[in-house]
Image (tube, grey):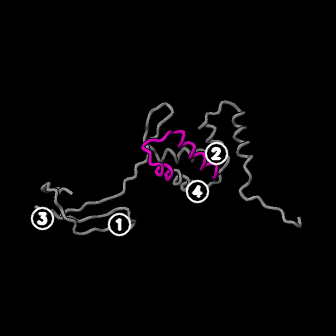
Amino acid sequence: MKCPFCSTPSTQVTDTRENDEGDIVRRRRRCMHCDKRFTTYERIELRMPQIVKRNGSRTEYDHEKLRGSMKLALRKRPVTAESVDAAIGRIEEKLLSLGEREILSEKLGEFVMRELRKLDKIAYIRFASVYRNFEDAEEFSEVIREVSARPPARARKPKASE
């Protein structure tokens, strides 16, 4: 680490501490040349991939845009804010775990649709209608059949005495 006072590259760490959350490290340093002390901070920098749109343009990932899209699809639906936050968290984890610098907007849309399908079928259909740019009622019907064909999550099995 270069000294901010005399620009000498030889400094010594005298104290290291983490903040309460454990995501920032504070280091006290001493310059070996001018003997002045200074503090540095280290924090993790996670970079979300850039989004490559259908027209080839690139844009930065926008957490609020994703939240807004999901909230629009979930408007007036009985889904808690905590569930939405958890779904967004899972989407962002997937984006980071890919380790890619860029991701196609179609892939991000598929991640969103997968999460919306788990949260609420109506929201899934709403999002799919915009995302897939439905042209006619038949496309709506196909998605409704797709969602309806899925067996219920916890179907009750009849007892032998019934």
Q: Give the secondary structure at mark 4.
A: helix
Which label lies toward us, 4 or 3?
Answer: 3
Quadrant hosting residue 143: top right
Say which label, 4 or 3, has the lower sequence index: 3
Q: Amino acid at mark 2?
A: Tyr
Say which label, 2 or 4, has the lower sequence index: 4
Q: Residues within 10 Å of mark 1 (few under 14, many from 20)?
A: few
Which label lies toward us, 3 or 1?
Answer: 3
- Identify the disc placed on residue 33: none
Q: Is residue 116 magenta?
A: yes
Q: Residues within 10 Å of mark 2 (few under 14, many from 20)?
A: many
Kindly report the distance in space between the C-alpha atoms of the residues bearing marks 3 and 1.
Answer: 26 Å
- Magenta part of the protein: which range? 92-119
Instruction: Give whichever of 31, 69 is nearer the camera.
Output: 31
Q: Amino acid at mark 4?
A: Ser
Residue appearing at x 61%, y 48% in the figure: 116
Mark 3–mark 1 contact, CB under 8 Å?
no
Q: Amino acid at mark 1?
A: Asn
Say which label, 3 or 2, has the lower sequence index: 3
- Identify the disc placed on residue 83: 4
Q: Give the secondary structure at mark 2.
A: helix
Q: Which residue is mark 1?
A: 19
Q: Give the secondary structure at mark 1.
A: loop
Q: Give the secondary structure at mark 3.
A: loop
Q: Is residue 11 magenta?
A: no
Q: Which residue is mark 3?
A: 35
Residue appearing at x 48%, y 47% in the figure: 64
Say which label, 3 or 1, has the lower sequence index: 1
Kindly report the distance in space between the C-alpha atoms of the residues bearing marks 2 and 4.
Answer: 14 Å
Provide the major secondary structure of the magenta segment. Answer: helix
Kindly report the distance in space between the C-alpha atoms of the residues bearing marks 1 and 2.
Answer: 40 Å
Q: Which residue is mark 2?
A: 124
